[in-house]
Image (cartoon, rainbow, N blue to C red):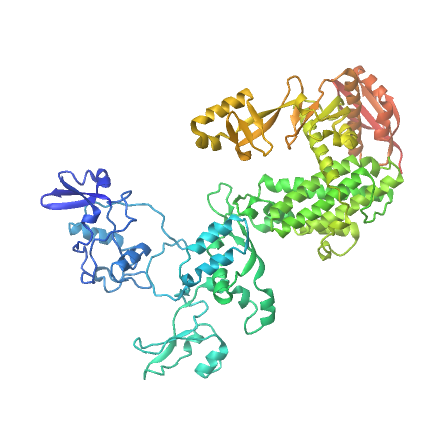
C-alpha cells in the first residue's frame, strides 16, 4: 500500500518509497521522476541477486509483500534472510522459500559463501560493503543505531540464526493455561489478566532444546541413518535406560550418557544415538514442584498432597520465565495451575532509575555493609513496606533517607516503648502479667486497637499484601507511643493510684508481647530481642499467632479515640503554623462536625494533649466551615467538552448540590464520586483546619492573654529543668533543690506556678537567685530574657 517513486538516470532506474525521497536528494541529483506506483505493482517480480551463492534457490529472489515494511528508515525496501530473523522466516515460509543458514556454530560464514568463508559475520561487514562499492551496486552507505540483542552475561552481540529444535506443543493446551490462571491470586492483581494473562493468550510452542555441552541431556535417541524408519525413542527413567541398553547407568550427564548406544533394529549398520541437545534450563525450573522430591519415583503421596504450591514469589520478568514454565508443565502434566498465590514484585533500580541493580553492573552496596550500617531489620522492612511488593519498581540507595525513616518511625519506637516499660517497671519493682481486662479508658482503647491490629495484619498477610501489613503496624506503633504511652505517663508514675498503675503496666506488657508476635515475620531480630527481654522465653518465633478474640472488641471506642488523635494532630499543626509552642496554653478548641458530640467522654484528652483550657464539641459544621467543590478537570474536560465551562461556573457560584448516592449536581451536570473533590474551607475570622474524613473541622483560639503567657513560661521552665536533670545524669526519682535566676518579667509567672513546677521536677525547694557552688548549672533563656538555673540532689531513692 506504500507509494514508491521510480527515478531514471542514464538508462538506470531507481525504486524507493516516495516518503523517503527527501533523505536521498543528493543521490538522486540528475535523475528524473518517471512514475509513482503502489508497492503491490512490484510484488511477484523477480530480481537478480547481488551475490551469486544461492541464485538457484527455488522461489527466492522475488519481491514479496509484508505489512511491517514502512518508510520511517531506509528506502521502504527490506531484504529477507529466512535463516536469520523471525519475520523473515515467516514471510519466506509463506512464499515457499526454504531456510538457508550459511553460518556455522562459531558465527563464521560456511564454504557456501566462497568469498568470506571462515570469516566472522560481524568482521565481514566492511569487506562486503567494499565489494558492493567496487561492483557499482552501492548507492549510499549509512549506519543506523538501534537496539540489538546482546548476551546478558558478557555483553557480546548475539547472532540470530535458525536452528533445529525440540518443542513442547504449548498451543495444544494454551486455553487450559488461560483458564487455570484465573484461579491464581496474583499480587498485584492486574498481573493475572495483564502481563501474565496476555502472555498466556499469545503463548507459542516452546523450544526446550539448547545446543550446549553442560545441561540436562534430552533423553531421546535417534538413528544416525536419516532414512531409518525407526522412530525416536524417549526414556523416562534409569530403569528404562538400563533395560534398553543392557548396562548399569550411573551417570546421566554428558559425556557418559552419550556413550549409551545400540544398533538400529531396522537398519543394519545404523546406530541409535542420543540427540546432541540439552534441555533449556527453564524446563528444569518449571519441573521444580515434582523434581525437587524425585516424583514419581519417590514421595508420591507427599507430592500429591502438596501440589499445587501455596505460594511463590519472584520479580515481574518471571511472567515470561519461571511463572510461565511452571504453568506450562503444570498444565501439560497435571492439568492444573502449579501455584495458588504469587507475589510478583517489582525491580530494584539505581537511584536515577536508569538500570536495575545487578551483579553484572556491580551497582549495589554489599548487603553485609547495609546490615552493618543500617541493620538487617531496617533493610527488610524497607523492602517489605515499599511499592516493590505490589509490583512497582524501587529506586534504591543504601544512603537513602527511607532506610533512616524505618529506624526513626518503626524500630526506635518499638525499642523506646520497650525501654520505657522496663525502666519504670524495674524502678517500681512491678511484675506485669498478660491480661486484657483493664477497665481504664486508655487501656481499653489500646487493647481494642491491638485486637484490630492482629485481625488486620492477619487479613493483609492472608492476602499476601506485605506492604499493607507494614502500614497497619506502623500506624499502630504511632498510636502506642505517641498517644497511649504519653497520655498514660502519670499512671506509670503512680499518680492515679496503685491499681491504675498496675493496669497500665499489665496492659503495656500485653500489647508489647502481642506487637512482637504480629511483627516478628517482618522484623525478626528486634522483635525477638524485645520478646525475650519481656518474657524470658526462648524466642518469639516459637510462639503461635496471637488470638485476636482474647482482646476486647470495641470498634466505636477505637474509632472515636482515633478521631480524637487526628483532631489533636490537626490542632497541633495549627499551633505550629501560628508559631505557638506546645507548652503555651491556649484558651479553647472546638471540634465541629458529624458526630462530634460523641467525643464528649474523651475531650479531657484533647484538652491535655493540645494544651487548651476548654474543649467544645458541636455538630454545627456549617457555622464554622464551608464545602468547596473542586471538579477533576482532567477527567471531565474530555468527557464534557464545552459543557465543562458550565460546571466551573456552577462551582464558583455555589450552584451545586451533593446527592445521597455520592454524586454531585453542578448546574445541570451530574458528577460521579471519582470526578470531583469536596474540601472544607474555614469561615473568615477563625483559625481552623479539616479532618481527613472531610466531615469535621478543628477551630483553635489563637489569642494569647498575659495569664496564658505566664503559664507557658512555667511549663517552659519545667522542660529546661528536666533537660538539666538528664544532663546531670540524675536518677528519675532523685529529689532536688532548684535555684532560678530569671528576669523580672518571668519571675511573677514562676512564683504563681511554683507548686506545679516543684511537683513536675521533683524539687523539694525552689529559690530565686544565682545558683550556689556545687549545683549543676545551666545558662539558657526564658521568655525574652536570660535564665540561669541550678540544681542539686538532696535525697535519692
The quadrant where residue 415 appears: top right
Q: Where residue 515 appears, x then y in whole percent?
A: 72, 47
For the N terminus, which image quadrant?
Answer: top left
Q: Where residue 536 appears, x then y in whole percent?
A: 79, 53
Q: Where residue 342 appears, x then y in whole percent?
A: 55, 54
Above or below for 680 versus 730: above
Above or below for 755 versus 94: above
Above or below for 309 versus 225: above
The answer to whether residue 769 is seen in the rendering is no
The answer to whether residue 456 is seen in the rendering is yes
Above or below for 302 versus 509: below
331 left or right, relative to 41: right
Q: Find the residue positioned furthest to the left.
A: 11
Q: Nearer the viewer, residue 310 or 270?
A: 310
256 left or right, relative to 536: left
The quadrant where residue 56 appears: bottom left
82 left or right, relative to 519: left
The quadrant where residue 583 appears: top right
For the C terminus, which image quadrant?
Answer: top right
Disc tally is 0
Q: Nearer the viewer, residue 406 or 568?
A: 568
The residue that appears at 71% across and 43% down in the rendered structure is 414
Q: Where residue 116 appears, x then y in whole percent?
A: 24, 59
213 left or right, relative to 759: left
Amino acid at each position: 500500500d506504500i507509494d514508491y517513486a521510480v527515478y531514471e538516470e542514464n538508462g538506470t532506474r531507481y525504486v524507493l518509497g516516495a516518503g523517503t525521497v527527501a533523505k536521498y536528494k543528493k543521490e538522486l541529483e540528475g535523475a528524473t521522476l518517471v512514475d509513482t506506483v503502489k508497492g503491490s505493482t512490484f510484488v511477484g517480480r523477480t530480481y537478480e541477486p547481488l551475490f551469486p551463492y544461492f541464485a538457484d534457490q527455488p522461489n527466492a529472489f522475488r519481491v514479496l509483500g509484508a505489512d511491517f515494511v514502512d518508510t520511517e528508515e531506509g528506502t521502504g525496501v527490506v531484504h529477507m534472510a529466512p535463516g536469520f530473523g523471525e519475520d523473515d522466516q515467516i514471510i519466506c515460509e509463506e512464499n515457499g522459500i526454504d531456510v538457508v543458514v550459511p553460518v556455522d556454530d562459531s558465527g563464521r560464514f560456511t564454504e557456501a559463501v566462497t568469498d568470506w568463508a571462515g570469516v566472522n559475520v560481524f568482521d565481514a561487514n566492511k569487506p562486503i560493503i567494499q565489494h558492493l562499492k567496487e561492483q557499482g551496486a552501492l548507492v549510499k552507505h549509512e549506519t543506523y543505531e538501534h537496539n540489538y540483542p546482546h548476551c546478558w552475561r558478557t555483553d557480546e552481540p548475539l547472532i540470530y540464526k535458525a536452528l533445529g529444535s525440540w518443542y513442547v506443543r504449548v498451543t495444544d493446551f494454551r486455553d487450559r493455561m488461560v483458564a487455570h490462571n484465573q484461579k491464581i491470586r496474583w499480587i498485584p492483581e492486574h498481573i493475572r489478566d495483564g502481563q501474565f494473562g496476555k502472555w498466556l493468550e499469545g503463548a507459542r510452542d516452546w523450544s526446550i532444546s539448547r545446543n550446549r555441552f553442560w545441561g540436562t541431556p534430552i533423553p531421546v535417541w535417534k538413528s544416525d541413518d536419516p532414512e531409518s524408519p525407526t522412530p525416536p525413542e524417549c526414556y523416562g527413567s534409569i530403569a528404562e535406560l538400563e533395560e534398553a541398553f543392557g548396562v548399569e547407568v550411573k551417570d546421566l550427564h554428558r559425556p557418559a550418557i552419550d556413550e549409551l548406544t545400540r544398533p538400529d533394529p531396522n537398519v543394519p549398520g545404523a546406530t541409535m544415538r542420543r540427540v546432541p541437545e540439552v534441555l533449556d534450563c527453564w524446563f528444569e525450573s518449571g519441573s521444580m514442584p515434582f523434581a525437587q522430591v524425585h516424583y514419581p519415583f519417590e514421595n508420591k503421596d507427599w507430592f500429591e498432597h502438596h501440589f499445587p504450591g501455596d505460594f511463590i514469589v519472584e520479580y515481574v520478568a518471571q511472567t515470561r520465565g519461571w511463572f510461565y514454565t511452571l504453568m506450562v508443565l503444570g498444565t501439560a502434566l497435571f492439568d492444573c495451575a502449579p501455584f495458588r498465590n504469587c507475589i510478583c514484585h517489582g525491580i530494584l533500580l539505581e537511584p536515577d532509575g536508569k538500570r536495575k541493580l545487578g551483579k553484572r553492573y556491580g551497582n549495589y552496596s554489599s548487603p553485609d555493609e547495609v546490615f552493618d550500617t543500617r541493620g538487617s531489620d531496617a533493610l527488610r522492612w524497607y523492602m517489605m513496606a515499599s511499592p516493590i511488593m505490589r509490583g512497582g519498581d524501587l529506586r534504591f540507595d543504601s544512603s537513602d533517607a527511607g532506610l533512616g525513616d524505618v529506624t526513626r518511625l518503626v524500630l526506635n519506637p518499638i525499642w523506646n516503648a520497650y525501654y520505657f516499660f522496663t525502666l519504670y517497671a524495674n524502678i517500681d519493682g512491678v511484675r506485669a502479667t498478660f491480661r486484657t481486662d483493664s477497665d481504664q479508658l486508655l487501656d481499653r482503647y489500646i487493647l481494642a486497637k491491638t485486637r484490630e491490629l492482629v485481625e488486620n495484619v492477619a487479613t493483609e498477610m492472608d492476602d499476601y499484601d506485605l506492604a499493607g501489613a507494614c502500614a497497619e503496624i506502623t500506624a499502630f506503633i504511632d498510636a502506642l507511643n505517641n498517644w497511649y504511652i504519653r497520655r498514660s505517663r502519670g499512671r506509670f508514675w503512680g499518680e492515679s493510684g496503685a491499681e491504675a498503675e498496675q493496669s497500665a503496666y499489665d496492659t503495656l506488657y500485653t500489647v508489647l508481647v502481642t506487637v512482637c508476635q504480629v511483627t516478628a515475620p517482618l522484623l525478626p531480630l528486634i522483635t525477638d530481642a524485645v520478646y525475650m527481654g519481656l518474657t524470658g522465653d526462648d524466642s518469639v518465633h516459637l510462639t503461635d499467632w496471637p488470638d485476636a478474640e482474647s482482646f476486647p472488641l470495641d470498634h466505636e471506642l477505637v474509632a472515636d479515640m482515633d478521631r480524637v488523635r487526628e483532631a489533636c494532630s490537626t490542632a497541633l499543626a495549627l499551633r505550629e503554623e501560628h508559631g505557638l509552642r506546645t507548652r503555651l496554653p491556649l484558651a479553647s478548641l472546638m471540634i465541629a462536625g458529624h458526630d462530634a458530640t460523641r467525643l464528649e467522654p474523651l475531650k479531657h484528652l484533647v484538652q491535655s494533649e493540645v494544651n487548651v483550657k476548654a474543649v467544645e464539641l458541636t455538630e454545627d459544621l456549617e457555622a464554622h466551615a464551608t464545602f468547596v467543590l473542586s471538579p477533576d478537570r482532567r477527567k471531565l474536560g474530555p468527557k464534557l467538552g464545552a459543557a465543562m465551562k458550565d460546571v466551573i461556573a456552577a462551582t464558583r457560584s455555589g450552584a451545586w448540590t451533593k446527592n445521597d448516592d455520592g454524586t454531585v449536581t453542578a448546574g445541570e451536570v451530574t458528577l460521579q464520586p471519582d470526578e470531583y473533590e469536596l474540601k472544607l474551607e474555614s469561615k473568615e475570622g477563625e483559625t481552623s483546619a479539616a479532618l481527613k474524613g472531610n466531615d469535621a473541622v478543628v477551630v483553635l483560639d489563637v489569642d494569647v492573654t498575659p495569664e496564658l503567657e505566664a503559664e507557658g513560661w512555667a511549663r517552659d521552665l519545667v522542660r529546661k529543668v528536666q533537660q538539666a536533670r538528664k544532663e546531670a545524669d540524675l536518677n528519675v526519682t532523685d529529689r532536688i533543690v532548684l535555684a532560678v535566676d530569671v528576669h523580672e518579667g518571668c519571675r511573677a509567672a514562676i512564683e504563681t506556678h511554683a507548686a506545679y513546677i516543684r511537683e513536675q521536677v521533683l524539687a523539694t525547694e525552689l529559690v530565686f537567685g544565682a545558683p550556689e557552688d556545687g549545683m549543676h548549672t545551666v545558662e539558657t533563656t526564658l521568655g525574652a530574657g536570660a535564665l540561669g538555673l541550678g540544681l542539686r540532689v538532696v535525697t535519692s531513692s
